[in-house]
Amino acid sequence: MDSQRNILLIALLFVSFLLFQQWNMDNSPQPQGQGTEQQVNNSGDVPSHSGDGQPIPDQETTSKDLITINTDVLALSVDTLGGDVTEAKLLAYDNELDSADPFILLKDEPGLSYIAQSGLIGANGIDSANGRAQLAVTAKDFTLADGQDELRVPMTYVKDGITYTKTFVLKRGSYAVDVEYTIDNQSASAASVQMYAQLRQNLMDDGGSLTMPTYRGGAYSTDTTNYKKYSFDDMQDKSLNMTTTNGWAAMLQHYFVSAWIPRSEEASNLFTRASNGLGYIGVRLPTTTIAAGTEQTLTATLWVGPKLQKEMEATAANLNLTVDYGWLWFIASPLHKLLSFIQGIVGNWGIAIMMLTFIVRGAMYPLTKAQYTSMAKMRMLQPKLTAMRERLGDDRQRMSQEMMELYKKEKVNPLGGCLPIVLQMPIFIALYWSLMESVELRHSPFFGWIHDLSAQDPYYILPLLMGVSMFMIQKMSPTTVTDPMQQKIMTFMPVMFTFFFLFFPSGLVLYWLVSNVVTLLQQTLIYRSLEKKGLHSK
């Protein structure tokens, strides 16, 4: 198989991959319950009750009586009615490239509501379908001071001899916010409460496109399912109702995630529901009884921030899997770690991508050399194969047998030119997902006109250079293709690839361009070596 056919194979594999990814986004299978998990209510009627029948509040409007909580990385707005987080600004991430405004992950605006709610339900809960508790605070603004590592913001409510204190605990440099409910029961009888925490967002399209199939929707983790997406369509079709000792419920979007992690040694419940154009996913901690004259604290952690794998893994088991590398995660994850290591040395993600390309292609050099050697040997056999076709005519069976004998005699593997291409495609696809999912590349500049490696080249210079490099590889590679139609298809390949890469993140185009340049260098060196051995001829 010669280089031109290899290019055609790459094109077919690549287009098939893109089509498969889009199909997978549109037709992902429904998650199935396992072990102690239960998925119920296939009718589409979504329950909004806790395990003991207590309805979870469905507060679709906020009071706008807000307090602000600020750390070095987060700026939160919290509604004193119920204590919901109605806005979360990520101070280390700009909203748009070179924007002075921070990125807003959680927000409550007309047409888009995406907030984090939590509360207490049950016999002595303070939140119900009839209303939420109005929590008292000592100030309107709370800020993590210089030199301070932790900020605690208490909000209180007193009812029937019981003091309820909802405390937000934030730490310097962290996107994990602990939400503690301390119930001080000074009444004459035991109190029973159940903490819930949920994320609420407008039902919307999953997002993404053919070349950038990003996902927006729910996800969860349980004892037996490390990570599973649960889209807005899933929420409308059926409710999620699972019991798990370790797990979390989340809302995902490109580069960012919000998640509730229950902090309980007993089993918690994961749930979803959809109503009035809103989708909910959340957790219910087990019902807790607080004896008279005692107090107890219930806790859940809210992660609200970028998809930082190391930090998320430290916050909750499997939360780092929200950085979804797809089915080639076992290749993509090491590539990302290697890329991050290189970036830590060179200080530029673009240069790190270039160096990673040299490393990958260098490691594959023996296969590349074997590929071109096999191609050269195949070209040497072309006169013999042509004479064989003329001698045997339409006897295909005899032709096949004699060809195999010839290959065996000359020690030629007719598929030797395909193997390096087949091995390169998984690496390319894995790197594609690694670059697509890396928030570190968001708004990261390379040099010159490339100000954001996660976005497409604004002037399409890299895709055009990539197309030129593919054309040069074609011209350098001798071909045995004589059919005019095949020749036209081969000539059109660089044009087709250039069109696809116009819409790809510039970091990925940079990888492919550098890879082509390395291929040209390797081709030159290998062909010169083969010419000395008499194996290469134009």
Image (cartoon, rainbow, N blue to C red):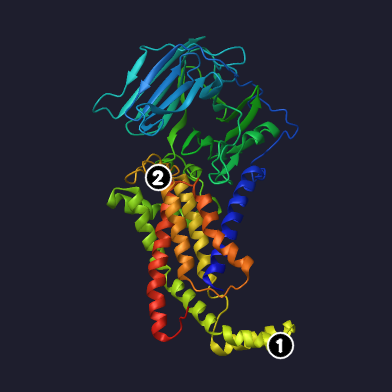
Above or below residue 11? Residue 221 is: above
Dot 1 corresponds to which residue?
392
Q: Which residue is mark 2?
A: 453
Identified at 41% across, 26% down, the residue is: 89
Task: Answer above or below: position of 159 versus 177.
Answer: above
The quadrant of the image that shows the N terminus is bottom right
Q: Position of residue 399 (x, y in %)?
A: 69, 85
How packed is label 1: few (under 14 Cα within 10 Å), some, or many (20 or more)? Answer: few
- Residue 416: horizontal and vertical position, in percent? 53, 75
Along the line of sight, which residue is nearer the eye, 188 or 97?
97
Q: CA distance from mark 1 to mark 2?
A: 56 Å
Q: Name the residue nearer the viewer: 300 or 487.
A: 487
| Position of 309 relative to 291 (above/below) | below
The secondary structure type at the circle numbered 2 is loop
From the top left corner, tell me how far across and down residue 301 is, in percent: 46, 31
Amino acid identity at mark 2: Leu
